[in-house]
Image (cartoon, grey):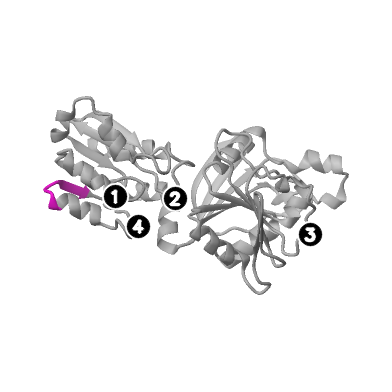
Amino acid sequence: MEQKIFMQRCLELAALGKGNVAPNPLVGAVLVVNNKIIGEGYHQHYGAAHAEVNAIAAVKDASLLKQATLYVNLEPCAHIGKTPPCADLVIASGIPKVVVAQLDPFEQVAGRGIEKMRTAGIDVQVGLLEAEAKWLNRRFLHFVQTKRPYVILKWAQTMSGYIAPHAHQMSAEAFEQQRHITGLLVQKQVHKWRTEEAAILVGRNTVETDNPALNARAWIGKHPLRIVVDRQLRLANHLKVFDGQTPTWVMNSVKSETLPNIEYVFFDENENWLNVLSTKMYQLGLQSLIIEGGAHILNHVIDSGLWQEAQVFYTPKHFSDGVPAPAIGGKLVDTFELDQSIFKRYLNG
């Protein structure tokens, strides 16, 4: 039971790095002697010290390390990247026992860290809270194993099954009052989630109708890369996505061009733009993509099967008519209530 508590602490610490460590994984580490934590740490920023380094540095009496058990949610690295190998530091510190939640599938690690520590005589156990550890790092794991970004679909819909009113059936003022179907707390939560993803995508219709900024202005954190699918480049330059405040890609079948903070990414008319985009994102180490609509884009991705997760808010707001919400399948894995809306998370497959 104590072991699970310490590994759970690792996962809590690791989660503090959300939005700051990608394309590295989220990692937390805890050092324990006689069921008491003597040091802990997590990977805080990409390129900065890893969790194990921070945990060891936090120990006030280094002599205790020779009695300590190190808990870590991901296998310590065994290669030289932005920082030296953590497995070497663990060995040099004289730590006799290491408990790891899961192996690292990254090809430069992939069991080598475990092997190196065991060869040095360290007692290494693997598999404690493995499922929870994999869930926390699902973006990293999918990215490494499939060489594609983790794709999240997100929308809000009324209980009657609509994601928006029909804009052409009401005045601009009435539409503006109706189009936000969730409350401010939900909108703030959504902006927080945006800071944790590499990129956010919408289609041309959404940009024309809503003129969204596609940033995380309601939360402290980084803005995601903005991506717009505008096949024939019909969008006007005065729209917010072209304000130059945040790097923006325009997926299109007209041209390939790079301007300050705006890049036009070409895809052939016969190509699936999501495959072209996924390849480019993988090459640049961009791990995750959240797609916020509209209905045409969401249905296209659902039909293609190229999504991993859907995040849906069901709100008490009611339209007698409007834009129908996508029909989502998949496995329901999470639900909670926030500001009168019901949130549901689905996984594909």
Observer-nearest of 151 and 89: 89
Secondary structure at badge 2 equals loop
Residue tagged 1: 77
Dot 1, crowdedness within 10 Å: few (<14), some or many (≥20)?
A: many
Which three-letter amino acid code belongs to the residue tagged 4? Answer: Phe
Instruction: State the image coordinates of residue 52 (x, y, percent, origin top left).
Output: 28, 39
Residue at the spot 31% in from the left edge and 35% down from the top edge: 54
Secondary structure at badge 3 equals loop
Of callouts 3 and 4, which one flags the residue occurring earlier in the amino acid sequence? 4
Of callouts 1 and 3, which one flags the residue occurring earlier in the amino acid sequence? 1
Residue tagged 3: 234
Which three-letter amino acid code belongs to the residue tagged 1? Answer: Cys
Furthest residue in direction left, as rendered: 121
Furthest residue in direction bottom, as rendered: 270
Q: How far apart are marks 3 and 2 (CA)?
A: 33 Å
Of callouts 2 and 4, which one flags the residue occurring earlier in the amino acid sequence? 2
